[in-house]
């Protein structure tokens, strides 16, 4: 349900100045949603690439964009890192001297165990770290891919360390709720294991199956593309996601991914054996059980929202 429908619009901005370090799909969607719902008084962006900065300003979802991350965070009371996780440590080092006392630093990465290790050591005293992960997205990237409705009815997980200022956590939670998200708090370790099975391994499988198709001989490869059934098309959609982001996901969540991947490999061997032996009952039982999970996902309204669907939702509000 959208913030308009729930009456969740804040009486005043939650943050006076919100800086987004990274203005791709997620960062630009945050900017659009924060502006639409009055969640931030001023929204500043950062990108290293001139083309990206020009595109963002032309689209109009930022008040200002900076090439220098330190200049972008100066005077901000909230900083959200929306860059690939491999860049976190470098960004933390760059912004640390410019962070305002009392500022809240958060992020959107899908691996949380590494955030405290790569960011916290560089933050000055009095700056609050509240790691977060909005579980929302599409396979598209760049400033033009974002849309304000991306987060509606999705889950955001926050993984603050013990002892973090409760008020800082409450403000980050209010920001995501203001954009239409449901919010859950858990430990970073638990988050990373859950996301390994619900997101990371599915992406790894998608990249693998599409890569297998690309390795086929040229004639067969052309037919695979031409006669793609729904299942393969879904895999190509997932495999169309940002390769830099997903490289960093697998490198930073290595232990949880390998643990779940081992379980998946064992299950795959069981299915291979059932097919080889003609064990139809085994296959049907497996497919029946997994079909129920799909129905649960649909019932929970946790399918990805494309911009076209979001536009219809907004129109209906």
Image: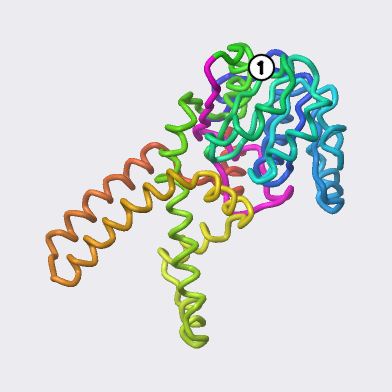
Residue name at image x 25 percent, y 62 percent: 269
Q: Quadrant of residue 171?
A: top right
Residue name at image x 47 percent, y 57 percent: 204
The residue range painted magenta reads 136-162
- Residue 232, position in %: x, y? 44, 66
Q: Quadrant of residue 85?
A: top right
Residue name at image x 47 percent, y 81 percent: 216
User: Is residue 269 placed above or below 57 in the rendered structure?
Assistant: below
Query: Between residues 75 and 59, which one lies in front from this camera angle?
Result: 75
In the image: residue 69, left or right of residue 148: right
- Residue 57, position in %: x, y? 85, 43
- Residue 22, position in %: x, y? 73, 42
Query: Between residues 105 and 295, which one lies in front from this camera angle?
Result: 105
Mark 1 lies on residue: 10
- Determine the secondary structure under disc 1: loop
In the image: residue 286, left or right of residue 183: left
Query: Between residues 120 and 5, which one lies in front from this camera angle?
Result: 120
Residue name at image x 31 percent, y 51 percent: 263
- Residue 106, position in %: x, y? 65, 28
User: Is residue 287 placed above or below 157 in the rendered structure?
Assistant: below
In the image: residue 99, left or right of residue 175: right
Residue 17 lies in magenta, yes or no? Answer: no
Mark 1, residues whose alpha carbon is within 10 Å: few (<14), some, or many (≥20)? some
């Amino acid at each position: 349900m959208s913030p308009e429908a729930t009456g969740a619009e804040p009486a005043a901005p939650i943050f006076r100045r919100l800086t987004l370090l990274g203005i791709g799909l997620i960062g630009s969607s945050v900017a659009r949603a924060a502006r639409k719902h009055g969640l931030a008084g001023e929204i500043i962006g950062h990108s290293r690439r001139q083309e990206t900065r020009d595109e963002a300003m032309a689209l109009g979802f930022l008040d200002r964009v900076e090439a220098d991350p330190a200049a972008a965070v100066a005077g901000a009371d909230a900083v959200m890192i929306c860059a690939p996780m491999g860049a976190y440590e470098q960004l933390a080092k760059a912004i640390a001297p410019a962070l305002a006392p009392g500022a809240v630093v958060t992020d959107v990465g899908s691996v949380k165990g590494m955030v405290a290790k790569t960011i916290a050591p560089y933050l000055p005293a009095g700056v609050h770290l509240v790691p977060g992960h909005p579980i929302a997205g599409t396979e598209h990237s760049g400033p033009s891919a974002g849309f304000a409705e991306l987060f509606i009815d999705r889950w955001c997980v926050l993984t603050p360390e013990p002892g973090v200022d409760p008020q800082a956590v409450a403000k980050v939670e209010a920001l995501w709720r203001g954009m239409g998200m449901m919010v859950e708090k858990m430990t970073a370790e638990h988050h990373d294991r859950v996301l390994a099975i619900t997101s990371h391994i599915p992406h790894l499988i998608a990249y693998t199956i599409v890569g297998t198709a690309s390795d086929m001989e040229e004639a067969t490869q052309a037919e695979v593309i031409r006669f793609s059934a729904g299942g393969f098309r879904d895999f190509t959609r997932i495999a169309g996601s940002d390769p830099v982001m997903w490289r960093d996901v697998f490198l930073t969540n290595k232990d949880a991914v390998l643990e779940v991947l081992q379980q998946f490999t064992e299950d795959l061997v069981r299915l291979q054996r059932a097919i080889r032996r003609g064990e139809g009952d085994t296959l049907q039982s497996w497919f029946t059980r997994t079909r129920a999970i799909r129905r649960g996902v649909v019932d929970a309204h946790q399918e990805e929202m494309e911009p076209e669907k979001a536009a219809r939702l907004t129109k209906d509000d």
